[in-house]
Every structure is written in structure tokens, then in C-alpha cells.
Image (cartoon, grey):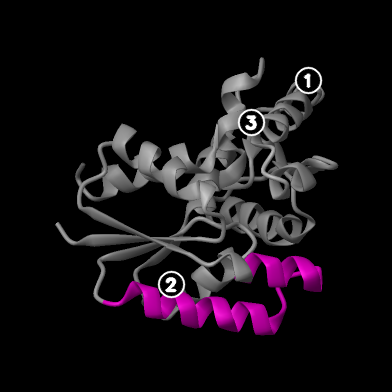
Amino acid sequence: MGELVFFHTAESNVELFERAARDAKLPGGRRHVVRPELLQSARIAGSLTDTVRSNAESQMAEALGDAVRLICTCSTIGPAADALASMGQPVIRVDRALAEQAVTKGPRIAVLVTLKTTIEPTRDLFMNVAEKLDRHIMLDMIFVEGASDLFADGNLADYNRAIASAVDATPVGYDAIALGQASMAPAAAKTSKPAMTSPDASMRALAVEMGG
């Protein structure tokens, strides 16, 4: 089994995906590449600009090398991963599996995010996935105010608590509640309502695909 490359924009996602890969019994060797400057550039610009997207595409293509698959774990630069995939490159974004699983739960979906740069690419992804699966969804994007500053300060405990509180404060009636960014996944263990996460969704889906 060949090598898998995980492409991150946050160092904390390395252990997060190592754990998720082990839990899913994902086969093959694993290599991690961390490029925080890509996310930082997008945050400064306020969106995934053409320049940031181009840089992300070139860096992911270089990181892929001879690996069997590159796995993009950052939702903000997810469209760059999609662009490479559309050119036949073995590149996936982890939030796609999250979207695919969420839209099968029912039409009413809430997706929580902590970065404003993530809102548009995540909304587009969920709507595109729903269209491909011929599902009509009512999607609410919920921004967790102030959480990104906690993460930037390294205060992960309060970051997770803020996300968990936001999940528990969501109105009743949603068929699925999803945490749109991989870094949010640990908060799911602290919620009273079930919340779907991209590390779990993507690693289990990939393990099935690869025969793990």
C-alpha cells in the first residue's frame, strides 16, 4: 500500500488525523505537510483569493509527488484541492465526506465554522454535494464568534468549549449538525447534541474505499 500525504494548514491537525486514521484502520503509510501561511494569507485577504488558491494548488501538487493520495484537511483551501482533483490528480478534501454523509441525514442541516474564510467554500461544497446526490437541503451556516481568536492564542480548551456551547445552542429540528473545520472535531466530545466531524467522516470513508 502506497503513501498517503496529509496537507494541513494547522499543526494541531497532524495528531487529530493520525488518531482518526488509526481509529478507522486506514491502510498505508502516512506523511504530513503543514503550510500555515496559506490559511494566514487567506485570513488577511478575507477570502480564498486567486493568488492564495494558486499557491495552495502548487504546494499541494508538489507535496503529492508519487504518493497514492493527498488529503487536504483545510476547509478554506478546499477549492484548490477540488481543482487538482478535476485535473485527474488523486487529491481529496476531508469536508467532502462530511458533506456527503450530512446530506443523507435529512434536509435541514446546520454547519458550524469558526473562520469567516471558511463560510463560502463550505456552503458551496454542501450545496454542490446535495445537487450531485439529488437532495434538496436547507443549509444554515453558523459562525462561532470569537472562537478563532482562542485557537490562534493556543487556548484549545476554551476553543472547544465555545464550539460545544454553540452546538448545544442550535435550535431543535436539524437533521444533521456538522463541524465544518477539522480543528473543531475535538469539541464533538463535549456536546450534548451529536455533531458530525470531518476527520471521522473522511477517514472512515477513505478506509472503506481503500479496503481497510
- For this orientation, the residue located farthest to the right is 145
- Classify residue 175 by image quadrant: top right
Q: CA distance from mark 3 to mark 1?
A: 11 Å
**Residue 193 x, y percent position in the rendering:** 66, 19
Name the quarter where the C terminus is drawn: top left
Please report the residue visible at 34 percent of the width from the left and 69 percent of the height from the top. Answer: 90
The crowding category of the residue bearing disc 1, from other C-alpha atoms within 10 Å (few below 14, some 14 to 19, many at least 20), is: few
For the residue pair 37 and 73, the one nearer the viewer reads as 37
Total marks shown come to 3
What type is the residue that disc 1 sits on?
Answer: Val
| Residue 51 visible to the viewer | yes
x, y (%) of residue 65?
30, 77
2 or 3: tag closer to the N-terminus: 2
Marker disc for residue 85: 2
- At x 29%, y 59%, the residue is 4
Label 1 sits on residue: 172
Residue type at the position of mark 2: Ala
Sort mark 2 into few (<14), some (14-19) or many (20+) by Cα contacts within 10 Å. Answer: some
> What mark, if any, has residue 190 been given in the picture?
none
| Left or right of 91 in this view: 179 | right
Q: Secondary structure at mark 2?
A: helix
> Where are the magenta residues, as a range?
38-65
The answer to whether residue 20 is above or below residue 40 is above
62 magenta-colored = yes
Is there a contact, CB below 8 Å, between mark 2 and mark 1?
A: no
Pointer 3: what residue?
A: 176
Mark with earlier residue (2, 1)? 2
Looking at the image, which residue is at 63% across and 52% down?
A: 126
